[in-house]
Image (cartoon, rainbow, N blue to C red):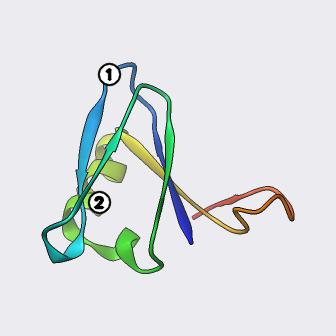
Amino acid sequence: MTTIRNLTIKPIKVPLPGGKSLRLGPKADGLVREGAEKHGAVIRMVEAGTIEVLTGSSHGHGPAQKR
């Protein structure tokens, strides 16, 4: 799983592949499928500094790694 972190102080909606979306509250994290970070809208949001994409274990087996 891949973690997406909202870096803003406002709630956001992150468009995902397949017409789905992830809603995140301020400074909140959410889990998405592997490969979602390659979606064009996600890439643009990362470049804008709105979100951060983290990879790694989501079950406490170590810290998530920035991608």
x and y percent of residue 29 in the render?
52, 43
Residue at 42% x, 25% y: name it. 26
In the picture, the disc for residue 42 is 2
Helix, strand or loop under label 2: helix
Counting from the top left corner in percent of width and height, residue 46 is at 36, 51
Indicate which disc, 1 or 2, sits on the residue closer to the N terminus: 1
Which corner quadrant holds the N terminus? Answer: bottom right
57 w.r.t. 44: above or below: below
Q: Dot 2: few (<14), some (14–19), or many (≥20) neighbours within 10 Å?
A: many
* Identity, as a three-letter code, of the amino acid under mark 1: Lys
SS of the residue under disc 1: loop
Outermost residue, left side: 19
Disc 1 residue crowd, few under 14, some 14–19, many 20+, Cα 10 Å? few
Give the label on residue 34, or none. Answer: none
Contact, mark 1 vs mark 2 (Cβ under 8 Å): no
Disc 1 versus disc 2: distance between alpha carbons?
A: 17 Å
Q: Is residue 30 shown left or right of residue 11?
A: right
Instruction: Give the residue drawn at x 57%, y 64%.
Output: 67
Q: Considering only vertical position in the picture, is 14 above or below 10?
A: below
In front of the other: 49 or 35: 35
Q: Which mark is residue 10?
A: 1
* Between marks 1 and 2 in the image, the one whose residue lies nearer the viewer: 1
Looking at the image, which residue is at 24% across and 65% down?
A: 16
Say which amino acid is labelled 2. Val
Q: How far across and how far down the image is residue 13, in percent?
A: 23, 43
Location of residue 24 (image quadrant): top left
Seen from the viewer's position, the closer of residues 14 and 38 is: 14
Image coordinates for residue 51, horizontal then vertical, percent: 40, 44
Instruction: Give the residue furthest to the right.
Output: 61
Task: Report the number of discs.
Answer: 2
Name the side, left or right, on which 8 lies relative to 66. left
Picture residue at 20% right of the left edge, 65% below the top: 20
